[in-house]
């Protein structure tokens, strides 16, 4: 549906207000945690969001965006303003779709199996690229949820780090939905411990630069627990409309 110009202005206004509020809160949370806001990556989760609105957020200063679905990413690909922002993949990735996004995204955040990593490695090698990835951890041990179980993480990192043309840059997690801030913070704290533990082990070819956790409802708690990348969708762009 075409938006009237006043609808567009309203959408822009609300994105601008949201963007400024989120930046202020990142600032506050970082400072409470004794860190600098510049060290926190603020990624906009852009599923269902029109490129025009995404590009508006980029014009405000958003430097990282993430899509969840390969098909949607490809449909929007030509329209993103990637001269100023970095496109990443944050959703569940099927092995047979890997080849469609290699070279288009700067980071794949959701790698949780040897099989998926092998395909990323194989295609990247063929294209003469190195693909940066995060390993997704199923910190809540939820059934039917993506991510490797914490006790399997070290073995998975060991195997993937030996593959060519793929480079592990950190960890990502989507904890279970929780009723309280304390409950979600416990998962974030557990993730941070794992992140530090893996960093200390100094695997070859692995740099634990990024800990990606925290979304619209809990990015402050995530930063307080040690996240240095948050992924914010609805709090920035408004409630999602699935077509
Ligand atoms: C949609 C999504 C987000 C953002 O969710 P909001 O609650 O809208 O902020 C973050 N991470 C992943 C992996 C997502 O799929």
Image (cartoon, rainbow, N blue to C red):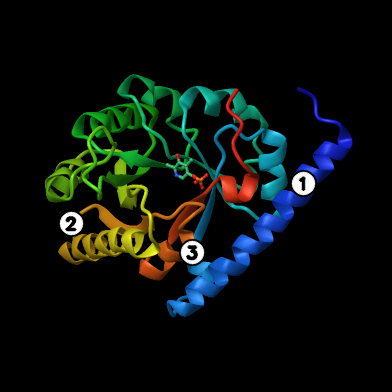
In the image shown, does 230 or 206 lie closer to the viewer? 230
Residue at 35 percent across and 40 percent down: it is 110
Rate crowding at label 1 as few (under 14), some (14 to 19) or many (20 or more) other CA atoms within 10 Å: some
Dividing the image into 4 quarters, which one contains the C terminus?
Answer: top right
Residue 147 percent across, percent down from the top left: 26, 41
Q: How many marks?
A: 3
Q: Which residue is mark 3?
A: 40
Marks 1/3: CA–CA distance: 24 Å
Rate crowding at label 3 as few (under 14), some (14 to 19) or many (20 or more) other CA atoms within 10 Å: many
Q: Give the secondary structure at mark 3.
A: loop
Residue 84 percent across, percent down from the top left: 64, 48
Residue at 29 percent across and 45 percent down: it is 135
Marks 2/1: CA–CA distance: 44 Å
Residue at 18 percent across and 45 percent down: it is 149
Is the residue marked 3 within 8 Å of ligand 1, measured from its CB?
Answer: no
Of callouts 2 and 1, which one flags the residue occurring earlier in the amino acid sequence? 1
The answer to whether 178 is drawn above or below residue 128 in the figure is below
In the image shown, does 6 or 72 lie closer to the viewer? 6
Q: Which residue is mark 1?
A: 12
Q: Quadrant of residue 214?
A: bottom left
The answer to whether residue 148 is left or right of residue 240 is left
Q: Give the secondary structure at mark 1.
A: helix
Badge number at residue 203? 2
Of callouts 1 and 3, which one flags the residue occurring earlier in the amino acid sequence? 1
Marks 3/2: CA–CA distance: 24 Å
The answer to whether residue 137 is left or right of residue 16 is left
Q: Nearer the viewer, mark 1 or mark 3?
A: 1
Residue 240 percent across, percent down from the top left: 59, 36
Rate crowding at label 2 as few (under 14), some (14 to 19) or many (20 or more) other CA atoms within 10 Å: some
Residue 111 percent across, percent down from the top left: 30, 38
Residue at 59 percent across and 32 percent down: it is 48
């Amino acid at each position: 549906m075409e938006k009237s110009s006043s609808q567009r202005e309203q959408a822009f206004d609300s994105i601008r207000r949201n963007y400024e509020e989120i930046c202020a809160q990142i600032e506050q949370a970082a400072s409470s945690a004794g860190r600098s806001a510049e060290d926190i990556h603020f990624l906009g989760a852009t599923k269902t969001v029109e490129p025009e609105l995404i590009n508006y957020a980029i014009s405000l200063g958003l430097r990282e965006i993430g899509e969840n679905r390969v098909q949607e990413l490809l449909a929007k690909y030509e329209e993103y303003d990637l001269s100023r922002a970095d496109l990443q993949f944050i959703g569940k990735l099927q092995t047979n779709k890997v080849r469609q996004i290699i070279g288009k995204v700067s980071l794949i955040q959701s790698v949780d199996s040897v099989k998926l990593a092998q395909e990323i490695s194989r295609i990247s090698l063929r294209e003469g690229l190195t693909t940066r990835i995060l390993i997704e951890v199923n910190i809540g041990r939820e059934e039917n949820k993506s991510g490797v179980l914490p006790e399997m993480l070290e073995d998975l990192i060991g195997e993937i780090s030996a593959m060519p043309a793929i480079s592990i840059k950190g960890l990502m997690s989507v904890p279970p939905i929780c009723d309280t801030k304390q409950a979600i913070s416990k998962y974030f704290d557990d993730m941070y411990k794992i992140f530090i533990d893996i960093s200390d082990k100094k695997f070859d070819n692995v740099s634990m630069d990024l800990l990606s956790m925290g979304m619209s409802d809990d990015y402050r708690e995530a930063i307080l627990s040690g996240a240095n990348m948050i992924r914010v969708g609805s709090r920035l762009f408004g409630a999602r409309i699935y077509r």
